[in-house]
Image: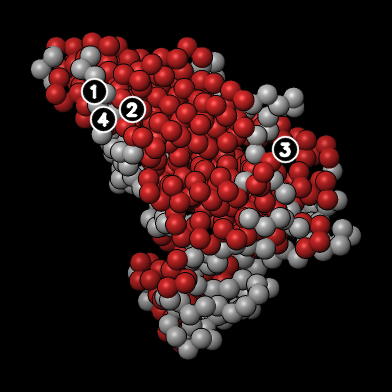
Amino acid sequence: MTGEPNTRLADLFGLAGWSKGELARLVNRQAAVMGHQQLATDTSRVRRWIDMGESPRDPVPKVLAALFTERLGRVVTIEDLGFVRPGRAGKRQATGNAEETANPDGLPWAPERTAAVLTEFTGMDLMLNRRGLVGAGAALAAGSALSSAMHDWLHTDPALASDAPDSGRPLQAEPAAFDRYEAAPIGSQEIEALEHSVEIFRAWDASRGGGLQRKAVVGQLNEVGGMLSYRHPDTLQRRLWGVAANLAVLAGWMSHDVGLEPTAQKYFVIAAHAAREGGDRPRAGEALSRAARQMVHLGRPDEALDLMKLAQTGSGDRNLPRTRAMLHTIEAWAQASLGHGQAMRRTLGEAEELFVSDRSDGPAPSWMQMFDEADLHGMQALAYRTLADHEPSAAITAQRHARRALELRINGRQRSKIFDYISLASACFIADDPEQADRYARLALVSMGETSSHRTWDRLREMYRLTGQYARHGSIQQLREEIQLAMPKQKTRHNPSRNAQA
């Protein structure tokens, strides 16, 4: 007990709208459902949790997390409630202080805690999916806060073998891991099957968007979290952490694609932890670069640059030139959003040189195989089109890169093609070429019904803004009417930037 109010629990309690007596009754009822019939909580106990900073014993934190998750319609974890997990070193910081506000999740996490957080978070996410609730309402952590919290940890070498328990014993995973999935040791064939499933999910996401398969990815990640509760031989353990990282990136990207922004950010952080625990710092850096792309999409490019610095320096010296080129294109997009044209052009030039210099004999990591020459041009088109809001002359260069990207696109990358069409149409509008803009806008519009990506509609809304000055033009007037009819009603899930896309 800290003797000070648990302000994080108090804030969530206020949002939920319960009385203290009502919450006590709900805790007892939910605990019984979860197999803890002996639990007896009363109003005075709830008051001590909130007003005196008392930390309840297991299973109460898990029970409270489940209750608040269902009530608020977004994932609420034990950390969100202001409680410390069993077995975590140190005491709970006094809630409300500056350090906790800057780093609300207590980053970074130990390996066993990463597995527990992963399993708890995915379990709550699945519960929201099953009950048709919307995972929104939480706040995004600032990019600078994430990068500051994780900087020293990511720049050190992982020591999985020395930090983990003996190979004959299971990891000391928290009981939460076993509530969601009956964990058991697995072998190389099972891990190979999991790695193959990642490729299938990744291809589906690129083709159809994140909405249709997100639940399946989250469920698979939840199972992997249970598997990580056991200590496998080092080679298998590292591969299993790699599967967790890849699935967490996909879960985050799919969540971002359908507008679940705080959920997406949490998955990107989980992915970075999983990758580093598996000894793959380049993968950890790429996961953080996804969080940076998300920040640019949400109109926070300065915070994206903070994250990109960590992604680039924390990746270590094993990054392939192509990976470094990809990271440079994201940095360039953030610079373009800030109107820093000279810096953007320099960064894109470096990206081109790195991409061309990549002559490695071995295959690229599976998570980099989506970044090819078409993607390089697509990101250049996006950066120049974004800069055109500040420097209209950049629209011509954006058109050139977008056309080249479309020429190179292969089948199965439908969402990327839509983004290219919208970038090209927007650049044409800025360059005062409404006829060409109309053509490419219609190509985007006819394809959008085939995906579940909310981000494509965000980009279309931005392009629609550009049509305003041509509203009296016959074909553009008709285009505007067709867009208005096709456009889903905009939700208040976030306020995308004027240059929103990723």
Q: Earlier in the sequence, mark 3 or mark 4?
A: 3
In the drawing, does residue 5 fall left or right of residue 437?
Answer: right
Residue 314 higher or lower than 166, as above or below: above
The residue under label 3 is 194
Mark in the foreground, 2 or 3: 2
Residue 125 shows in this picture = no
**First reached walking from the N terminus: tag 2 or tag 4:** 2
In the rendered image, residue 368, in percent from the top left (x then y), is placed at: 62, 32
Residue at which label 4 appears: 391
Question: In which quarter of the view is residue 193 placed?
Answer: top right
Residues tagged 1 and 2 counted as in contact (Cβ below 8 A):
yes
Instruction: Give the farthest residue toward the right.
Output: 168
Element type at mark 3 = helix
Split into 4 quadrants, where in the image is the C terminus? top left
Pick whichever of labels 1 and 2 is earlier in the sequence.
2
Front one among 302 and 130: 302
As drawn, 1 above or below 332: below
3D distance between C-alphas at marks 1 and 2: 9 Å
What's the amino acid at mark 2?
Arg
- Badge 1 density bin: few <14, some 14–19, many ≥20, Cα 10 Å: many
Does the image show residue 96? yes
